[in-house]
Image (cartoon, rainbow, N blue to C red):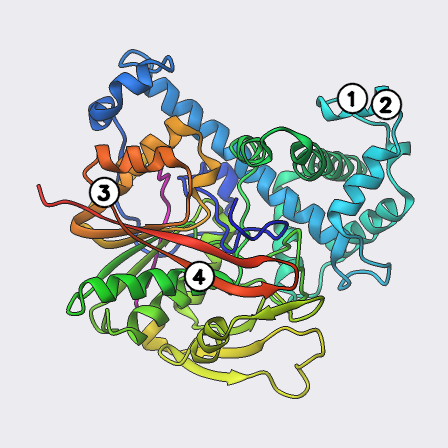
Amino acid sequence: MSSLGGLRRLQRSAAPLFLASIVAGAAYPVRSQEQPRVRIAWQDVAVFHDALQARGIDRSNFDSHVERLQRTNIERVREGDLDHLVFYLLQSTRFTNLSPIEPAQSAKALVDGLSAEAREAFLAGGSLPATQLPPAVHARAAALLRALDGGGAEDDSRLAYFRELVSVALPEGEARQTALVAEYLRAMRFLYRQEFVAQRGANPSAAVRDLYQRRGFSTDTAVEAGFLVHSGLGVAKGLEPDRRVRRVLIVGPGMDLAPRTAFVEGPAESYQPWAVIDALLALGLAGKDTLEVVAADINPRVVAHLERARLTPPRLSLVTELAERDGVTLSEDYREYFAQLGRAIGDARPAGRQDSSSDGRLRKTVVIRAAVARTLRVARLDVVTERLEGPPFDLVIATNVLPYFDDPGLMLAVTNIAAMLAPGGVFLHNEPRPVLGEITDALGLPFEQSRHAVIARVVGAPPLGDSIWLHRKRAP
């Protein structure tokens, strides 16, 4: 994890992959022209043959290994979506007057209230009877299901998102509440392991890393993530002032749905594609007439959301995840970034008096220009198991995506990323694992520069921020 400590990573994202039509559902068609994809083959990972064979993956079983990855990832898509449903259930005030419940506190109250024997069994994967569900959670779950079953609220994009999710991911009728309770218990088990078990171990960071490589794919994203990428693009500009970027791939742009921390009511939105376009134009790295940005995400609802945004330019409501309170002060660099954000891509306005609040967050709206929206494309891609055909990319961005992959998965994902990059192309990421440096070196994609972006300072604690790494592909 980054130096954000207890806060979630600044940019989600989960690993993009091709989803079976049964997962995508007919309600979320992708209208943009499908780009051809090439499945990864054993010969593509030649530089990792020894490392993969040491893990039991060889020529004879490579294809079946890739197929298992795809099936597993589809289930991780479902679990990640249902995690957000649980966090929405606990925190939203849009569907009920009941008091919100902080997810980590809910997990602690649930698990600590069990006997030692029941606690051990539950954390090992066992179930709990419905009678163990805290009454407040039971009441909020019932209220959410009533809201989802009631129709209406077409203007509430988060509720609409979860209504579609529930319709395809959970059973109908009386079994739906039982299934929702089961998802709550699953999410609380993971959260308790992450926050209260892993932290007590000898190596908390490694324990959390191992948990993330098995958890569902989150769609989390935040406005702060754009600052990190902007910092990385500033490094690229400094290294090559005359460089021009024409084709960009964003791996896992994500969507602000229902984060576990810093939940703020509002529309479901995807920020990263617009923040990347804004940074490229503002820094003079690209021109809107020649720029093409391809956004690829694991989640079919995110893909559909971005496709709609491409066709009907959105009015973004930008709210910082971090708030200036409890000893937290936003850095001047981040304040300046937020003040300028959106000016290169649309009509950027500070929040009006009716939208402002005293919660210490920065707020603004940005109405995206139609010409800017036309630079966006949407693609379905499993970055671990396949790559896009066609012209190579000048820039690939993958923030908060790579932590979801174990080392063999990382080898496959970066192999595909390297194959999609043009010679001299730049790869930006924020994955701190040392093994990534070994992988990129082997692929002719060596580390070149890094930048640490400080977003806020905290009295009595280290600054809050994240680091971004820049790699450049060698010419053949």
**Which residue reaches farthest left?**
476
Q: Quadrant of residue 112?
A: top right
Q: CB under 8 Å between callouts 4 and 1?
A: no
Main SS type for the magenta part? loop
Q: How dense is the environment of label 2, judged by Cα within 10 Å: few (below 14), some, or many (20 and up)? A: few
**Residue 187 locus on image (x, y percent):** 69, 38
Q: Quadrant of residue 17?
A: top left
Span highlighted in magenta in the image: 374-384
**Which residue reaches farthest bottom?**
353
Q: Amino acid at mark 2?
A: Ala
Which sits in the foreground, 306 or 84?
84
Q: Is residue 321 magenta?
A: no
Distance from the alpha carbon under mark 2 to that under mark 4: 43 Å
Q: How dense is the environment of label 1, judged by Cα within 10 Å: few (below 14), some, or many (20 and up)? A: few
Q: Amino acid at mark 4?
A: Ala
Q: Amino acid at mark 3?
A: Pro
- Residue 120: mark in rendering: 1
Q: Which residue in the protein does label 2 denote? A: 116
**Residue 206 locus on image (x, y percent):** 54, 32
Distance from the alpha carbon under mark 2 to that under mark 1: 6 Å
Name the residue located 48 percent from the left edge and 63 percent from the top edge. Answer: 454
Q: Which residue in the protein does label 3 denote? A: 446
State which tag comes first along the sequence, 3 or 2: 2
**Residue 105 locus on image (x, y percent):** 79, 46
Q: Secondary structure at mark 2?
A: helix
Distance from the alpha carbon under mark 4 to that under mark 1: 40 Å
Q: Is residue 378 magenta?
A: yes
Q: Secondary structure at mark 1?
A: helix
